[in-house]
Image: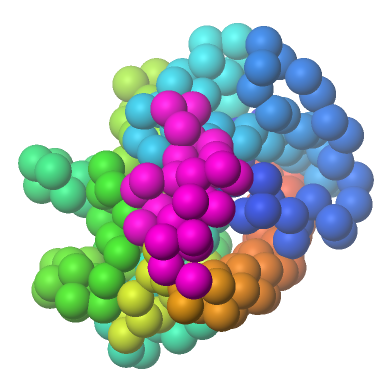
Amino acid sequence: MRFLVTFALGAEFGGWRKRGGFRAERREGTEAYRKQEGAIELVVLVSGAGMENAGRAATWALEREPFDLVISSGLAGGLRPEHRLGTVLVARKVLRLEDGRALEPAAMWSRLAVEEGASEAVLVSAMRVAGTAEEKRQLGRTADAVEMESFAVLEAAAARGVPAAAIRAVSDPVEGDMPVDFNRVFDRRGRLRGAALAGELARKPTAIAGLLRLARESRHAAEILGEFLERYTRAAAKLAAART
């Protein structure tokens, strides 16, 4: 079996990548990695932030080789007090914020994530970073966590009849504001622009401490996510072997 796993940013993948076994590939400018995990071959893509970039990367991969499962993974903003830093969530439903459309991931693979310790959740995919605690509280009326890519990845998989799952770790709980407006610092490919971030910090020097805290907490969440994905893919390999 072959699984496709997508992340928006390399830092989100870093906690899993450091556990070893991944070999880097270069695919027409897309950052890609491959690893064998028992009966499962894992292909990881780092798409860049945002639905357009994630959907494009997933579609590109799905057109080039067959997959048995697609997983949208990475970090997310918590929308409810019970989802603390590092909480791993698996989606039972993914909503698209802009029009309310909903997709339901593959039940079998989502159940496996719950068995491995993830909490079942409703995710909402947005076109913009939810930057304030008030924005997150409003979104928390209908969802457990917010991110920017899962709906597009699941939509690309559904268009090709491939089962999909969405697994996220909370990196910023609901009560926290983002230290800067991240909607200003990503380029069209969803990559962080260092000069733009420096400009934001020059306008708001007090944000430096908050940015350093967010970086630490994001690394911590990525470590927890990496440990979970390592455990999950090993369990998936055993499940796949049992089904053959």
Query: Which residue is rendered at x = 90% and y = 52% of the image?
Result: 20
Q: Is 167 left, or right, of 16 in this rendering?
A: left
In the image, residue 188 above or below residue 48: above
* Position of residue 43 measured from the top left corner of the image (x, y, whole percent): 70, 33
Which quarter of the rendered picture does the N terminus lie within? top right
* Position of residue 31 measured from the top left corner of the image (x, y, whole percent): 69, 28
Closer to us: 243 or 227:
227
Furthest toward the front, the residue is: 202
* Position of residue 122 measured from the top left corner of the image (x, y, whole percent): 28, 64
Query: Which residue is rendered at x = 49% and y = 71% of the image?
Result: 205
Residue 112: quadrant of the picture: bottom right
Which quarter of the rendered picture does the C terminus lie within? top right
* Position of residue 184 measured from the top left corner of the image (x, y, whole percent): 37, 46
Closer to us: 166 or 131:
131
The answer, for residue 167, to whether it is visible in the render is no
The magenta segment is: 181-205
Instruction: Check if residue 187 falls in the magenta segment.
Output: yes
Closer to us: 146 or 67:
146
Residue 93: quadrant of the picture: bottom left
